[in-house]
Image (cartoon, rainbow, N blue to C red):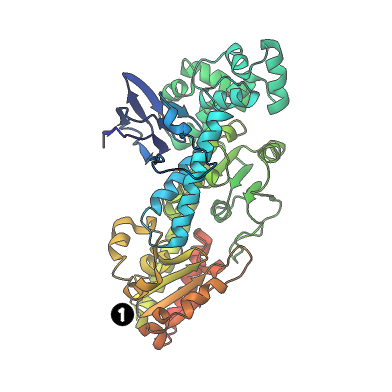
Amino acid sequence: MPMHKINEPSPVLIGVARGKGILRMDDHAHELTEGNVVLLPPHRHAALIANAQHPLHAYRFAIHTIEQTGSLLAGAMIQKSELNAYSSIKLIPNQSSIVAQMEELYIHRSTASEMRHVQNQIIVHQIILQLLQQHNEHDPTGDQPSMERSITYLESHYTDKISREHLAEIAGVSHSHYSILFKKMTGFSPNEYLSRLRIHRAMELLISGSGTLREIALEVGYKDEFYLSRRFKQHAGTSPSGYNQRTSHRIAVLLPPYASHLLTLGVEPTVIIAESNEYVNATDLAPPQSITFMNTSSTIEQIDATLLENGIELIIAAKQHLDMYGLNLAHLRAIAPVIEIPWMDLGWKEHLRLIAKAVHRSELAEQWLAAFEQEEQAARSLVQQSAAADEIITILVSKPEGLYVYGARNAGYVLYQSLGLHSPERIRPEIDKLGDQFHSIPIELSDLAEYAGDRILVIVYPDANGSSSHSDALFNSIHWRTLPAVLRENIHLLDLDEWIPYNPISIRLQLQRAAALFGSDQ
Protein backbone atom coordinates (compact mmCIF):
# COMPACT_ATOMS: atom_id res chain seq x y z
CA MET A 1 0.00 0.00 0.00
CA PRO A 2 1.24 3.54 -0.64
CA MET A 3 0.03 4.63 2.80
CA HIS A 4 -1.05 2.96 6.06
CA LYS A 5 -2.77 5.09 8.72
CA ILE A 6 -2.37 4.42 12.45
CA ASN A 7 -4.50 5.62 15.37
CA GLU A 8 -4.55 3.32 18.38
CA PRO A 9 -5.61 3.90 22.00
CA SER A 10 -2.41 2.11 23.06
CA PRO A 11 1.30 2.41 22.21
CA VAL A 12 2.17 1.02 18.77
CA LEU A 13 5.52 -0.50 17.86
CA ILE A 14 6.61 -0.39 14.21
CA GLY A 15 9.48 -2.63 13.12
CA VAL A 16 11.00 -2.12 9.66
CA ALA A 17 12.07 -5.45 8.18
CA ARG A 18 13.01 -4.26 4.68
CA GLY A 19 12.85 -1.25 2.41
CA LYS A 20 12.52 2.45 3.14
CA GLY A 21 9.70 4.85 3.93
CA ILE A 22 8.44 7.81 5.90
CA LEU A 23 6.54 7.96 9.17
CA ARG A 24 4.50 11.16 9.31
CA MET A 25 3.06 12.45 12.60
CA ASP A 26 2.09 15.95 13.73
CA ASP A 27 3.42 17.53 10.52
CA HIS A 28 6.83 15.93 11.12
CA ALA A 29 8.36 13.32 8.80
CA HIS A 30 10.73 10.65 10.08
CA GLU A 31 12.78 8.59 7.62
CA LEU A 32 12.55 4.82 8.12
CA THR A 33 15.16 2.30 7.05
CA GLU A 34 15.75 -1.40 7.62
CA GLY A 35 16.18 -2.30 11.28
CA ASN A 36 14.45 0.81 12.61
CA VAL A 37 11.99 0.41 15.47
CA VAL A 38 9.49 3.17 16.21
CA LEU A 39 7.35 3.45 19.34
CA LEU A 40 4.29 5.63 18.83
CA PRO A 41 2.45 7.09 21.84
CA PRO A 42 -1.21 6.17 22.34
CA HIS A 43 -4.06 8.16 20.77
CA ARG A 44 -1.88 9.75 18.09
CA HIS A 45 -2.60 9.93 14.38
CA ALA A 46 0.30 8.75 12.21
CA ALA A 47 0.84 7.39 8.71
CA LEU A 48 3.40 5.07 7.14
CA ILE A 49 4.27 6.20 3.62
CA ALA A 50 5.98 3.72 1.33
CA ASN A 51 8.97 4.32 -0.93
CA ALA A 52 8.20 3.22 -4.51
CA GLN A 53 11.84 2.29 -5.23
CA HIS A 54 12.35 0.47 -1.90
CA PRO A 55 8.95 -1.01 -0.88
CA LEU A 56 8.42 -0.82 2.87
CA HIS A 57 7.97 -4.12 4.72
CA ALA A 58 7.13 -3.38 8.34
CA TYR A 59 5.41 -5.07 11.27
CA ARG A 60 2.92 -3.23 13.46
CA PHE A 61 2.48 -4.34 17.07
CA ALA A 62 -0.08 -2.67 19.35
CA ILE A 63 0.80 -2.99 23.05
CA HIS A 64 -2.43 -3.06 25.05
CA THR A 65 -2.27 -2.83 28.84
CA ILE A 66 -5.06 -3.67 31.28
CA GLU A 67 -5.50 -1.39 34.27
CA GLN A 68 -6.27 -2.89 37.67
CA THR A 69 -9.97 -2.46 38.48
CA GLY A 70 -10.60 -4.87 41.34
CA SER A 71 -9.32 -4.68 44.91
CA LEU A 72 -5.65 -5.41 45.49
CA LEU A 73 -4.24 -8.10 47.71
CA ALA A 74 -2.87 -6.88 51.04
CA GLY A 75 0.57 -5.37 50.55
CA ALA A 76 0.28 -5.35 46.73
CA MET A 77 1.59 -2.39 44.74
CA ILE A 78 0.66 -1.23 41.27
CA GLN A 79 2.40 1.01 38.77
CA LYS A 80 1.30 2.18 35.36
CA SER A 81 3.31 0.93 32.40
CA GLU A 82 6.15 3.23 31.31
CA LEU A 83 5.19 2.49 27.72
CA ASN A 84 1.94 4.38 28.23
CA ALA A 85 3.85 7.39 29.56
CA TYR A 86 5.42 8.34 26.22
CA SER A 87 4.03 11.55 24.77
CA SER A 88 6.27 11.79 21.71
CA ILE A 89 7.52 9.46 19.02
CA LYS A 90 10.56 7.33 19.88
CA LEU A 91 12.69 6.16 16.93
CA ILE A 92 15.37 3.58 17.75
CA PRO A 93 17.85 2.61 14.98
CA ASN A 94 19.66 -0.72 14.58
CA GLN A 95 17.14 -2.89 16.42
CA SER A 96 17.14 -5.85 14.03
CA SER A 97 16.70 -8.31 16.92
CA ILE A 98 13.39 -6.69 17.92
CA VAL A 99 12.24 -6.68 14.28
CA ALA A 100 13.11 -10.39 14.00
CA GLN A 101 11.06 -11.09 17.16
CA MET A 102 8.10 -9.16 15.73
CA GLU A 103 8.40 -11.19 12.53
CA GLU A 104 8.37 -14.43 14.54
CA LEU A 105 5.23 -13.31 16.38
CA TYR A 106 3.57 -12.53 13.05
CA ILE A 107 4.48 -15.92 11.57
CA HIS A 108 3.04 -17.74 14.59
CA ARG A 109 0.18 -15.32 15.26
CA SER A 110 -2.51 -18.01 14.83
CA THR A 111 -1.73 -21.08 16.88
CA ALA A 112 -3.72 -23.67 18.80
CA SER A 113 -0.57 -25.04 20.44
CA GLU A 114 -0.20 -24.13 24.10
CA MET A 115 3.59 -24.46 23.83
CA ARG A 116 3.72 -22.05 20.89
CA HIS A 117 1.39 -19.68 22.73
CA VAL A 118 3.76 -19.64 25.72
CA GLN A 119 6.70 -19.03 23.35
CA ASN A 120 4.81 -16.07 21.90
CA GLN A 121 4.21 -14.67 25.39
CA ILE A 122 7.92 -14.97 26.17
CA ILE A 123 8.81 -13.10 22.96
CA VAL A 124 6.30 -10.34 23.80
CA HIS A 125 7.93 -9.85 27.20
CA GLN A 126 11.41 -9.90 25.63
CA ILE A 127 10.35 -7.10 23.27
CA ILE A 128 8.90 -5.03 26.10
CA LEU A 129 12.00 -5.66 28.22
CA GLN A 130 14.27 -4.40 25.43
CA LEU A 131 12.11 -1.30 24.97
CA LEU A 132 12.29 -0.53 28.69
CA GLN A 133 16.05 -1.10 28.68
CA GLN A 134 16.36 1.30 25.76
CA HIS A 135 14.34 3.84 27.72
CA ASN A 136 16.23 3.46 30.98
CA GLU A 137 19.78 2.60 29.93
CA HIS A 138 20.65 2.67 26.25
CA ASP A 139 18.37 5.25 24.73
CA PRO A 140 20.27 6.66 21.69
CA THR A 141 18.27 9.90 22.00
CA GLY A 142 18.81 10.16 25.76
CA ASP A 143 21.24 12.26 27.72
CA GLN A 144 23.74 9.60 28.77
CA PRO A 145 26.68 9.77 26.33
CA SER A 146 28.94 6.91 25.27
CA MET A 147 31.59 6.07 22.69
CA GLU A 148 29.51 3.10 21.50
CA ARG A 149 26.58 5.38 20.78
CA SER A 150 28.72 7.74 18.74
CA ILE A 151 30.12 4.86 16.66
CA THR A 152 26.62 3.49 16.08
CA TYR A 153 25.53 6.97 15.06
CA LEU A 154 28.41 7.21 12.58
CA GLU A 155 27.56 3.78 11.11
CA SER A 156 23.93 4.83 10.64
CA HIS A 157 24.58 8.37 9.30
CA TYR A 158 27.78 7.94 7.28
CA THR A 159 26.13 9.49 4.20
CA ASP A 160 25.56 12.76 6.09
CA LYS A 161 28.03 15.55 6.84
CA ILE A 162 29.42 14.51 10.22
CA SER A 163 32.00 16.44 12.22
CA ARG A 164 34.30 15.02 14.86
CA GLU A 165 32.93 17.66 17.22
CA HIS A 166 29.41 16.32 16.83
CA LEU A 167 30.55 12.74 17.46
CA ALA A 168 32.51 13.85 20.51
CA GLU A 169 29.41 15.62 21.81
CA ILE A 170 27.39 12.38 21.42
CA ALA A 171 30.13 10.49 23.25
CA GLY A 172 30.38 13.11 25.97
CA VAL A 173 34.15 13.58 25.71
CA SER A 174 36.43 16.39 24.58
CA HIS A 175 37.17 16.82 20.87
CA SER A 176 40.87 16.05 21.31
CA HIS A 177 40.30 12.99 23.50
CA TYR A 178 37.59 11.58 21.21
CA SER A 179 39.96 10.56 18.39
CA ILE A 180 42.23 8.76 20.85
CA LEU A 181 39.33 6.77 22.32
CA PHE A 182 37.86 6.09 18.88
CA LYS A 183 41.09 4.61 17.52
CA LYS A 184 41.55 2.55 20.67
CA MET A 185 38.11 1.01 20.16
CA THR A 186 38.11 0.54 16.37
CA GLY A 187 41.73 0.63 15.23
CA PHE A 188 40.93 3.58 12.93
CA SER A 189 40.62 7.32 13.23
CA PRO A 190 37.07 8.74 12.87
CA ASN A 191 37.88 10.00 9.35
CA GLU A 192 39.34 6.63 8.31
CA TYR A 193 36.30 4.82 9.70
CA LEU A 194 33.91 7.16 7.86
CA SER A 195 35.88 6.73 4.64
CA ARG A 196 35.75 2.94 4.95
CA LEU A 197 31.99 3.01 5.45
CA ARG A 198 31.49 5.17 2.37
CA ILE A 199 33.95 3.39 0.07
CA HIS A 200 32.76 -0.08 1.07
CA ARG A 201 29.16 0.95 0.42
CA ALA A 202 30.26 2.25 -2.98
CA MET A 203 31.90 -1.14 -3.64
CA GLU A 204 28.63 -2.89 -2.79
CA LEU A 205 26.76 -0.70 -5.26
CA LEU A 206 29.39 -1.28 -7.96
CA ILE A 207 29.15 -5.06 -7.49
CA SER A 208 25.36 -5.00 -7.72
CA GLY A 209 25.44 -2.61 -10.70
CA SER A 210 23.21 -0.08 -8.92
CA GLY A 211 23.42 3.30 -10.64
CA THR A 212 26.01 5.43 -12.37
CA LEU A 213 29.22 6.46 -10.65
CA ARG A 214 27.77 9.92 -10.00
CA GLU A 215 24.63 8.42 -8.45
CA ILE A 216 26.76 6.14 -6.27
CA ALA A 217 28.93 9.06 -5.15
CA LEU A 218 25.90 11.07 -4.05
CA GLU A 219 24.33 8.06 -2.34
CA VAL A 220 27.38 7.35 -0.17
CA GLY A 221 27.88 10.99 0.84
CA TYR A 222 30.43 12.38 -1.66
CA LYS A 223 29.81 15.55 -3.67
CA ASP A 224 30.59 14.05 -7.11
CA GLU A 225 32.09 11.07 -8.94
CA PHE A 226 35.51 12.70 -9.22
CA TYR A 227 35.92 13.03 -5.47
CA LEU A 228 34.63 9.46 -5.02
CA SER A 229 37.18 8.16 -7.55
CA ARG A 230 40.01 9.96 -5.77
CA ARG A 231 39.07 8.60 -2.33
CA PHE A 232 38.30 5.18 -3.81
CA LYS A 233 41.79 4.86 -5.30
CA GLN A 234 43.41 5.97 -2.03
CA HIS A 235 41.55 3.23 -0.18
CA ALA A 236 41.42 0.38 -2.72
CA GLY A 237 44.51 1.07 -4.82
CA THR A 238 42.41 1.08 -7.98
CA SER A 239 39.72 3.18 -9.64
CA PRO A 240 36.03 2.23 -9.35
CA SER A 241 36.08 0.88 -12.93
CA GLY A 242 39.18 -1.15 -12.15
CA TYR A 243 37.58 -2.53 -8.98
CA ASN A 244 34.60 -3.77 -10.97
CA GLN A 245 36.94 -5.95 -13.01
CA ARG A 246 38.88 -7.26 -10.01
CA THR A 247 38.01 -10.46 -8.19
CA SER A 248 38.00 -10.45 -4.41
CA HIS A 249 40.21 -13.30 -3.22
CA ARG A 250 39.74 -13.03 0.53
CA ILE A 251 36.07 -13.61 1.28
CA ALA A 252 34.27 -14.17 4.57
CA VAL A 253 30.98 -16.05 4.71
CA LEU A 254 28.74 -15.41 7.66
CA LEU A 255 26.89 -18.69 8.19
CA PRO A 256 26.46 -21.51 5.69
CA PRO A 257 25.17 -22.38 3.15
CA TYR A 258 26.80 -19.62 1.11
CA ALA A 259 30.20 -21.20 1.71
CA SER A 260 29.05 -24.14 -0.41
CA HIS A 261 27.95 -21.79 -3.18
CA LEU A 262 31.46 -20.34 -3.30
CA LEU A 263 33.06 -23.79 -3.28
CA THR A 264 30.77 -24.76 -6.16
CA LEU A 265 32.24 -21.83 -8.08
CA GLY A 266 35.80 -22.87 -7.25
CA VAL A 267 36.29 -20.08 -4.70
CA GLU A 268 37.48 -21.03 -1.22
CA PRO A 269 36.30 -18.69 1.55
CA THR A 270 39.02 -17.33 3.81
CA VAL A 271 36.78 -17.15 6.89
CA ILE A 272 33.53 -18.96 7.70
CA ILE A 273 31.49 -17.96 10.73
CA ALA A 274 29.13 -20.81 11.54
CA GLU A 275 27.73 -22.97 14.34
CA SER A 276 30.21 -25.73 13.44
CA ASN A 277 33.01 -26.38 10.94
CA GLU A 278 30.72 -28.67 8.95
CA TYR A 279 30.66 -28.01 5.22
CA VAL A 280 29.64 -29.96 2.15
CA ASN A 281 32.06 -32.56 0.83
CA ALA A 282 31.39 -34.08 -2.58
CA THR A 283 33.39 -35.88 -5.23
CA ASP A 284 33.30 -32.92 -7.59
CA LEU A 285 34.60 -30.45 -4.99
CA ALA A 286 38.19 -30.07 -3.94
CA PRO A 287 38.47 -30.26 -0.12
CA PRO A 288 39.04 -26.87 1.55
CA GLN A 289 42.70 -26.15 2.27
CA SER A 290 43.02 -23.17 4.60
CA ILE A 291 39.66 -21.91 5.82
CA THR A 292 39.48 -20.19 9.21
CA PHE A 293 36.36 -21.28 11.07
CA MET A 294 34.77 -19.13 13.78
CA ASN A 295 31.85 -20.11 15.97
CA THR A 296 28.77 -17.92 16.03
CA SER A 297 29.20 -17.65 19.80
CA SER A 298 32.33 -15.51 19.26
CA THR A 299 32.11 -11.92 20.46
CA ILE A 300 31.79 -9.06 18.00
CA GLU A 301 35.30 -7.96 18.99
CA GLN A 302 36.67 -11.43 18.15
CA ILE A 303 34.87 -11.47 14.80
CA ASP A 304 36.13 -7.98 13.94
CA ALA A 305 39.71 -8.92 14.82
CA THR A 306 39.62 -12.15 12.78
CA LEU A 307 38.16 -10.45 9.72
CA LEU A 308 40.76 -7.65 9.87
CA GLU A 309 43.68 -10.01 10.55
CA ASN A 310 42.72 -12.10 7.51
CA GLY A 311 42.49 -9.03 5.25
CA ILE A 312 38.90 -9.77 4.25
CA GLU A 313 37.95 -7.99 1.03
CA LEU A 314 34.31 -9.08 0.80
CA ILE A 315 31.67 -10.37 3.22
CA ILE A 316 28.76 -12.50 2.00
CA ALA A 317 25.80 -12.97 4.30
CA ALA A 318 22.02 -13.00 4.63
CA LYS A 319 20.56 -10.28 6.83
CA GLN A 320 18.17 -12.79 8.36
CA HIS A 321 21.16 -14.76 9.64
CA LEU A 322 22.98 -11.64 10.83
CA ASP A 323 19.91 -10.63 12.83
CA MET A 324 19.64 -14.14 14.26
CA TYR A 325 23.10 -13.85 15.82
CA GLY A 326 23.02 -10.16 16.70
CA LEU A 327 25.50 -9.08 14.01
CA ASN A 328 25.09 -5.60 12.55
CA LEU A 329 25.50 -5.18 8.79
CA ALA A 330 26.31 -1.47 9.18
CA HIS A 331 29.10 -2.32 11.61
CA LEU A 332 30.55 -5.07 9.38
CA ARG A 333 30.66 -2.60 6.48
CA ALA A 334 33.50 -0.76 8.22
CA ILE A 335 35.59 -3.92 7.81
CA ALA A 336 34.69 -4.83 4.21
CA PRO A 337 31.87 -4.41 1.70
CA VAL A 338 28.93 -6.66 2.57
CA ILE A 339 26.99 -8.44 -0.16
CA GLU A 340 23.60 -9.23 1.34
CA ILE A 341 22.02 -12.29 -0.29
CA PRO A 342 18.36 -12.59 0.82
CA TRP A 343 17.80 -16.05 2.27
CA MET A 344 14.07 -16.82 2.32
CA ASP A 345 13.12 -14.39 -0.47
CA LEU A 346 15.11 -16.27 -3.11
CA GLY A 347 15.78 -19.85 -4.15
CA TRP A 348 19.17 -21.55 -4.26
CA LYS A 349 19.66 -20.91 -7.99
CA GLU A 350 19.28 -17.15 -7.52
CA HIS A 351 21.58 -17.34 -4.49
CA LEU A 352 24.21 -18.95 -6.71
CA ARG A 353 23.77 -16.40 -9.49
CA LEU A 354 24.07 -13.41 -7.14
CA ILE A 355 27.16 -14.81 -5.45
CA ALA A 356 28.67 -15.68 -8.82
CA LYS A 357 28.11 -12.11 -9.98
CA ALA A 358 29.86 -10.78 -6.88
CA VAL A 359 32.95 -12.93 -7.49
CA HIS A 360 32.96 -12.66 -11.31
CA ARG A 361 32.03 -16.32 -11.89
CA SER A 362 28.65 -15.87 -13.62
CA GLU A 363 29.62 -17.91 -16.68
CA LEU A 364 30.76 -20.80 -14.50
CA ALA A 365 27.51 -20.63 -12.51
CA GLU A 366 25.42 -20.86 -15.67
CA GLN A 367 27.47 -23.83 -16.88
CA TRP A 368 26.92 -25.58 -13.56
CA LEU A 369 23.18 -24.87 -13.64
CA ALA A 370 22.89 -26.09 -17.23
CA ALA A 371 24.59 -29.37 -16.29
CA PHE A 372 22.31 -29.70 -13.27
CA GLU A 373 19.21 -29.19 -15.42
CA GLN A 374 20.31 -32.07 -17.63
CA GLU A 375 20.64 -34.24 -14.52
CA GLU A 376 17.16 -33.09 -13.47
CA GLN A 377 15.66 -34.13 -16.79
CA ALA A 378 17.29 -37.56 -16.63
CA ALA A 379 16.14 -38.11 -13.03
CA ARG A 380 12.61 -36.93 -13.80
CA SER A 381 12.35 -39.31 -16.75
CA LEU A 382 13.42 -42.18 -14.50
CA VAL A 383 11.09 -41.34 -11.60
CA GLN A 384 8.09 -40.59 -13.82
CA GLN A 385 8.13 -44.26 -14.81
CA SER A 386 7.92 -45.38 -11.18
CA ALA A 387 4.91 -45.94 -8.92
CA ALA A 388 5.74 -42.69 -7.12
CA ALA A 389 4.78 -40.67 -10.20
CA ASP A 390 1.07 -41.27 -9.48
CA GLU A 391 1.30 -40.86 -5.71
CA ILE A 392 0.97 -37.90 -3.40
CA ILE A 393 4.23 -37.43 -1.52
CA THR A 394 4.30 -35.72 1.88
CA ILE A 395 7.43 -34.41 3.56
CA LEU A 396 6.75 -34.47 7.31
CA VAL A 397 9.28 -32.89 9.65
CA SER A 398 9.21 -33.46 13.40
CA LYS A 399 10.92 -30.77 15.47
CA PRO A 400 10.99 -30.36 19.25
CA GLU A 401 8.58 -27.43 18.92
CA GLY A 402 6.08 -29.19 16.65
CA LEU A 403 5.18 -30.82 13.32
CA TYR A 404 5.73 -29.25 9.90
CA VAL A 405 4.78 -30.14 6.35
CA TYR A 406 7.50 -28.95 4.00
CA GLY A 407 6.88 -27.19 0.72
CA ALA A 408 9.14 -26.63 -2.28
CA ARG A 409 12.32 -25.76 -0.40
CA ASN A 410 15.02 -28.04 1.05
CA ALA A 411 14.04 -31.64 0.19
CA GLY A 412 10.81 -30.32 -1.32
CA TYR A 413 12.68 -28.58 -4.14
CA VAL A 414 13.97 -31.84 -5.56
CA LEU A 415 10.71 -33.75 -5.08
CA TYR A 416 8.21 -31.20 -6.32
CA GLN A 417 10.28 -28.98 -8.63
CA SER A 418 13.00 -31.21 -10.07
CA LEU A 419 11.11 -34.52 -10.25
CA GLY A 420 7.59 -33.14 -10.68
CA LEU A 421 6.07 -35.38 -7.98
CA HIS A 422 2.68 -34.55 -6.48
CA SER A 423 2.49 -32.56 -3.25
CA PRO A 424 -0.41 -32.76 -0.77
CA GLU A 425 -3.46 -30.96 -2.08
CA ARG A 426 -3.59 -28.65 0.93
CA ILE A 427 -0.20 -27.07 0.11
CA ARG A 428 -0.28 -27.27 -3.69
CA PRO A 429 -1.68 -23.72 -4.20
CA GLU A 430 1.12 -22.27 -2.06
CA ILE A 431 3.77 -24.15 -4.03
CA ASP A 432 2.24 -22.97 -7.32
CA LYS A 433 2.17 -19.39 -6.08
CA LEU A 434 5.46 -19.12 -4.18
CA GLY A 435 7.68 -21.87 -5.65
CA ASP A 436 10.78 -22.49 -3.58
CA GLN A 437 9.99 -19.48 -1.38
CA PHE A 438 7.37 -21.69 0.28
CA HIS A 439 9.31 -23.38 3.06
CA SER A 440 6.81 -25.13 5.35
CA ILE A 441 3.65 -24.83 7.42
CA PRO A 442 3.13 -25.95 11.02
CA ILE A 443 0.34 -28.47 11.61
CA GLU A 444 -1.30 -30.06 14.61
CA LEU A 445 -1.12 -33.82 15.11
CA SER A 446 -4.90 -34.00 14.76
CA ASP A 447 -4.63 -32.48 11.24
CA LEU A 448 -2.11 -35.06 10.02
CA ALA A 449 -4.62 -37.04 7.91
CA GLU A 450 -5.44 -33.93 5.85
CA TYR A 451 -1.80 -33.60 4.72
CA ALA A 452 -0.67 -37.24 4.62
CA GLY A 453 -0.17 -38.59 1.11
CA ASP A 454 0.25 -42.05 -0.37
CA ARG A 455 3.90 -41.92 0.66
CA ILE A 456 5.39 -40.03 3.61
CA LEU A 457 9.00 -38.95 3.96
CA VAL A 458 9.85 -38.23 7.61
CA ILE A 459 12.73 -36.10 8.88
CA VAL A 460 13.33 -35.76 12.64
CA TYR A 461 15.22 -32.84 14.17
CA PRO A 462 16.91 -33.67 17.51
CA ASP A 463 16.47 -31.37 20.48
CA ALA A 464 19.23 -29.30 22.11
CA ASN A 465 20.52 -32.42 23.89
CA GLY A 466 20.61 -34.52 20.72
CA SER A 467 17.52 -36.54 21.66
CA SER A 468 14.76 -37.47 19.20
CA SER A 469 12.37 -38.73 21.89
CA HIS A 470 9.94 -35.89 21.13
CA SER A 471 9.00 -37.74 17.91
CA ASP A 472 7.56 -40.60 20.00
CA ALA A 473 4.41 -38.55 20.43
CA LEU A 474 4.00 -38.67 16.65
CA PHE A 475 4.84 -42.31 16.01
CA ASN A 476 2.81 -43.62 18.97
CA SER A 477 -0.30 -41.57 18.23
CA ILE A 478 -3.52 -42.97 16.79
CA HIS A 479 -3.36 -40.19 14.18
CA TRP A 480 -0.12 -41.67 12.82
CA ARG A 481 -0.84 -45.38 13.19
CA THR A 482 -4.11 -45.21 11.24
CA LEU A 483 -2.70 -43.39 8.19
CA PRO A 484 -3.01 -45.46 4.98
CA ALA A 485 0.66 -44.84 4.14
CA VAL A 486 1.67 -46.20 7.56
CA LEU A 487 -0.60 -49.26 7.22
CA ARG A 488 0.97 -49.99 3.80
CA GLU A 489 4.46 -49.33 5.25
CA ASN A 490 4.97 -46.67 2.62
CA ILE A 491 7.15 -44.57 4.96
CA HIS A 492 10.74 -43.41 4.45
CA LEU A 493 12.84 -42.06 7.34
CA LEU A 494 15.31 -39.61 5.87
CA ASP A 495 18.59 -38.39 7.31
CA LEU A 496 18.42 -34.75 8.39
CA ASP A 497 21.96 -33.91 7.25
CA GLU A 498 21.37 -35.40 3.80
CA TRP A 499 17.97 -33.91 2.96
CA ILE A 500 17.72 -30.51 4.66
CA PRO A 501 20.83 -28.53 3.51
CA TYR A 502 19.85 -26.01 0.84
CA ASN A 503 22.74 -25.23 -1.48
CA PRO A 504 23.81 -26.32 -4.98
CA ILE A 505 25.92 -29.33 -3.97
CA SER A 506 23.38 -30.61 -1.44
CA ILE A 507 20.52 -30.20 -3.91
CA ARG A 508 22.45 -32.18 -6.51
CA LEU A 509 23.11 -34.96 -3.99
CA GLN A 510 19.45 -34.94 -2.95
CA LEU A 511 18.46 -35.32 -6.60
CA GLN A 512 20.66 -38.40 -6.87
CA ARG A 513 19.24 -39.87 -3.64
CA ALA A 514 15.65 -39.19 -4.70
CA ALA A 515 16.20 -40.82 -8.09
CA ALA A 516 17.63 -43.89 -6.35
CA LEU A 517 14.79 -43.93 -3.77
CA PHE A 518 11.87 -43.67 -6.18
CA GLY A 519 13.48 -45.21 -9.24
CA SER A 520 13.83 -48.53 -7.39
CA ASP A 521 10.01 -48.83 -7.33
CA GLN A 522 9.77 -49.46 -11.07
The residue lying at 33 percent from left, 25 percent from top is 24
- Above or below, 394 against 42 in this view is below
The residue lying at 38 percent from left, 64 percent from top is 407
Left or right: 38, with 470 as reference point: left
- Regarding residue 69, the answer to whether it shows in the image is yes
Tell me which corner region of the image, top left, top right, bottom left or bottom right, holds residue 443. bottom left
Left or right: 175, with 262 as reference point: right
- Above or below, 396 against 78 in this view is below
Q: Nearer the viewer, residue 28 or 20?
A: 28
Q: How far from the left and from the top, in percent, is residue 410?
A: 46, 63
Tell me which corner region of the image, top left, top right, bottom left or bottom right, holds residue 48. top left
The residue lying at 41 percent from left, 73 percent from top is 379
| Residue at the disc numbered 1 | 390
Tell me which corner region of the image, top left, top right, bottom left or bottom right, holds residue 288. bottom right
Secondary element at image label 1: helix
The residue lying at 63 percent from left, 15 percent from top is 168
Q: Nearer the viewer, residue 323 or 262?
A: 323
Q: Quadrant of the N terminus?
A: top left
Kind of residue indicated by mark 1: Asp
Q: How far from the left and from the top, in percent, is residue 300?
A: 65, 39
- Regarding residue 360, the answer to whether it shows in the image is no
